[in-house]
Image: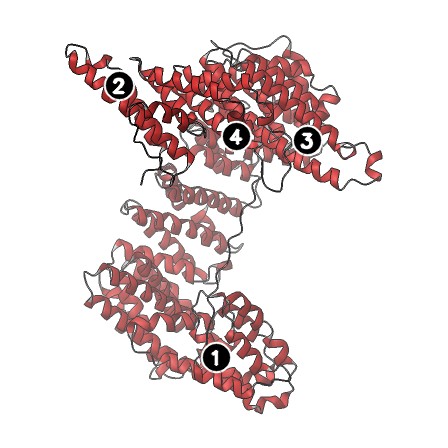
Amino acid sequence: MVLKKKKKEIQVDAFSLDCQQLEKLQGFSKAEEQNLASLLLHCAQLSNGIQQIQCIKQIMPLVKAMDQNSACDPMLKACLEILGETYFSLNMKNPLKKVLASSLNGLPEWFMTLAVQSFVCCLREELKTTDVYLYRKVLDNLASCMEDFNLGRASITNLFEEVLQFLQKALLDIQEENRSNNGNRIVQTRLMHDLLMAIKVAMMLVQKLQENIQGSLWKSHESFVWQSMCNLLKSSSDFLMDETLLQTVQTTSGLAFILFTKAMYEPAEELPSLVSDLLCGSRKLAGMPAWFVNNCGALCTEQLSDSVLLFLCHGALAMLDWKSGSMGENGEKLLLDIASVLLSLSSELKESSMATSLSRILAIWTNSALAALIPDSPNLKVKLNGNSEVVGKLLEYVYTHWEHPLDAVRHQSKLIFRNLLQIHRTIIAASDEKSDPFFARLTRRLLSLEWHVKGKYASLACLVECLGTENILQLDRSIPVQILNVMNDQSLAPYASDLLETMFTNHKVQFTSGSQKSTWIDQWHDVWVSPLLQILCEGNHDQTTYIIDYYLPKLLRCSPDSLSYMIRILQASADANLGSWSTRGALGALMACLRTARAHGHLELSNIMSRGLVSTESIKQGLVHQHNQVCIDALGLLCETHRSTEIVSVEEMQLILFFITYNLNSQSPSVRQQICSLLRKLFCRIRESSQVLYKWEQNKTKQELFEDSPKRNPLGILQKYQDFLSSLCDRLFEALFPGSSHPTRFSALSILGSVAEIFSVQKGQEQVFRLDQEINSARVRTLIQCFASTFEEVKVLAFELLMKLRDVVFSLQDSESLDLLFQAAMDLSTSTKPYDCVTASYLLNFLAYHEDLQHICLGKWIKHNPQMNEDTSVGTVEKNILAVIKLLLVNVEEEIFQAKKSLLQAAASFPMYGRVHCINGALQQLPLK
């Protein structure tokens, strides 16, 4: 069944204006027509953020309708000022902020100057903030202005120096405040995130406005912009070296350091050499610019820690341009130096977060290396081909980490391996991959590993994507069978099925793109389907279960047409290979394939039965097979479908009744649970499809009366549903005869409970079936007799079913029957057998819902307490329970008195035990305050 996901309501905080702003808008508003001021005034008076969004979207059409002369209109100036103030007052996450920015992006060009002036005034006020704990709001506003907002970006460009000054001050103030709050974890965490945001905003400023500032940056090393950039560079260097900061702050500082250096360093061709010197620790201060040494002295002179080296490598890989070898030989050397540093760190960084970062950065390195490869870089090709030292070490890293405990590390290891294959493939572009020694050696190594090595599967899948399945199979045709044999281990089954899916999908692509387009399917079936069918017939339970769960759905998704081949092969051998209690046989394999195909939408059961591909007799044989799972698969074939409203056919209903006849007495608890679960799906399908049928009946047209479809006679199908469910309930109640086994009772009561629940009357819906209409006094007695079962779960199921049907059940009970039941419960409560007392408890709990119970208790209670007053302030159930408890307590008092006369009587034989048990059961039903 497909469940509809409830849409989450979007909450938008509405903005409001102060009195001065409202008065200003009211002064410009016109009652007779809507202008910009009246629209903003109306928008501000709305209390719903969603409505305000709709209102803001109406601003631009009004503004665009104004002519160019309106640029001098005081009303427009006032409105733009209020819009600017509103924009900067909104929280960054408020959708209103993005909607307002999007609307203002459509501002006509002749109003831009006036709008920029308004926004510049607002931004200037923001930049005057001095409270360190309010910096975050300013930083968020700066980030928003640079994020696809023309007006915001123009405002920052106009105030570029003030923004730079604010960012310098914010970085220093937040760092100082963090130091002064040492030990206060909550405050420090907040400050760390503010610091992280400040670094990100500084990076955005340099990246997005670089073309606007490049000229002023190089005018003089004494200029304000240059000095500000030096200060930002120094701060990023300090943060990078500060091990007390959060790892995310250090990582981002590494990015910022490379970005700022790249913006300031000349000549740009020497930048890779500078970064190489820092990473390799050569400390050639003589070749470094004085301004760089002055601002980043610690990086140039001190021994860098492993984490600093890691973040520097990340910064270089992320911030430098590696495409098409644009940095020349220096860039190639830096790329190899970074690989050397990262590989040396792999043996040092063991902490989980650092190990994850390292694996991610190594994957980024392989992407950068792939981007840097160009035809005329022979040196890099030699250094990065599959036989090189660097690639060899990276492969060792993959082998070491492909079974790492962290998912992220395993995933990155797979990416590294895939990229290494692509790098080598790019380098040998003109050569034949099949005969390449590196690929041949790598394939042999992977195939030689044991199949319990989980990392082998992902790596082989990458190799298949690179070389093609056929090239792998030429080395060993038994690979598919080997992988299928591994799938008796559930921990390996997902890995094995993923590899198989990659292989057979790639193999199909190879075949369909080749010259043998007409005959490929037979070869494909021989490799991928035939071994599957053989194992399904003869494999052990675990292996076949995991193959059906993990592998079969993927195979059918890749080639739905293969189902007909499976049916043909299995049908041909079904009579000769029926299977046993331990193996499915061909019949069991057929049921499994059909069930999986139907559940995933690859099969119409009525279609294959009408065409004679699968006979009713075959399904019947499956429904009574001695192998439990074959029975379940055959039942699943009838009950499971990918469409929750698919109509249940007459053949399916007949087969379900046939199944019920022979399988209620299953001795396996798990099988009983599966039967109940599958039948529940069938009942849900009947309910959902019946609602569709009722709608068809209501909307039926004359044309549909002559069509050969379910729409022709929906009432006929509904009647068949009623007959089926009625027959099913007849068989279930018949199975509850006195002396029936516990498994039979459990199954029958569970299924009846599902029927009662699923077909309960719901407001505004017609139900195709109601169980209460099938209830008579004999069936009520049958259910009550289930309380006598020695199995607690049978008592529970019977009690729950009676509670679901209590209105009709009590209407069938006269006062004489009620009195007899009550007396039986009281008699059972005196029993020395514990299960009799439990039975009494369930009986009394059931009777507590009957209105006449209190009168029976009243007659017995008056004998002991003629002064009893009836409490009219409580409901019927509470009155009944209180009456029962009082009566039981009186009996307990009498029994205690009698027990005193015979102290030698064993305590365990006190009838009082049963009374106390019943009192406890009754109290559990009473909502005591």
Q: Is residue 379 visible?
A: no
In space, the residues marked 4 and 3 are separated at their CA atoms by 31 Å
Q: Inspect the image, locate mark 1, and give the three-letter code of the amino acid beneath it.
A: Gly
Disc 3 or 1, which lies upstream in sequence?
Answer: 1
Q: Which of the numbered marks, if any, corresponds to residue 913?
A: 2
- The quarter of the picture where the C terminus appears is top left
Q: Which residue is mark 4?
A: 807
Q: Along the line of sight, which residue is nearer the eye, 778 or 145?
A: 778
Q: Which of the numbered marks, if any, corresponds to residue 84?
A: 1
The answer to whether marks 4 and 3 mark residues whose Cβ atoms lie closer than 8 Å is no
Which element type, helix, strand or loop, lies under badge 1?
helix
The answer to whether marks 2 and 4 mark residues whose Cβ atoms lie closer than 8 Å is no
Neighbours of disc 2 within 10 Å: few (<14), some (14-19), many (20+): many
Neighbours of disc 1 within 10 Å: few (<14), some (14-19), many (20+): many
Which element type, helix, strand or loop, lies under badge 3?
loop
Which element type, helix, strand or loop, lies under badge 2?
helix
Q: Inspect the image, locate mark 2, and give the three-letter code of the amino acid beneath it.
A: Tyr
The answer to whether marks 3 and 1 mark residues whose Cβ atoms lie closer than 8 Å is no
Q: Which of the numbered marks, if any, corresponds to residue 647?
A: 3
Front of the two marks 3 and 2: 2
Q: Inspect the image, locate mark 4, and give the three-letter code of the amino acid beneath it.
A: Asp
Image quadrant in which you'd find residue 38: bottom right
Which element type, helix, strand or loop, lies under badge 4?
helix
Disc 2 or 1, which lies upstream in sequence?
Answer: 1
Q: Picture coordinates of residue 166 (x, y %)?
A: 34, 77
Q: Along the line of sight, which residue is nearer the eye, 857 or 922?
A: 857
- What residue is drawn where x is 39% and y is 16%? 824
Disc 3 or 2, which lies upstream in sequence?
Answer: 3
Q: Inspect the image, locate mark 3, and give the three-letter code of the amino acid beneath it.
A: Ile
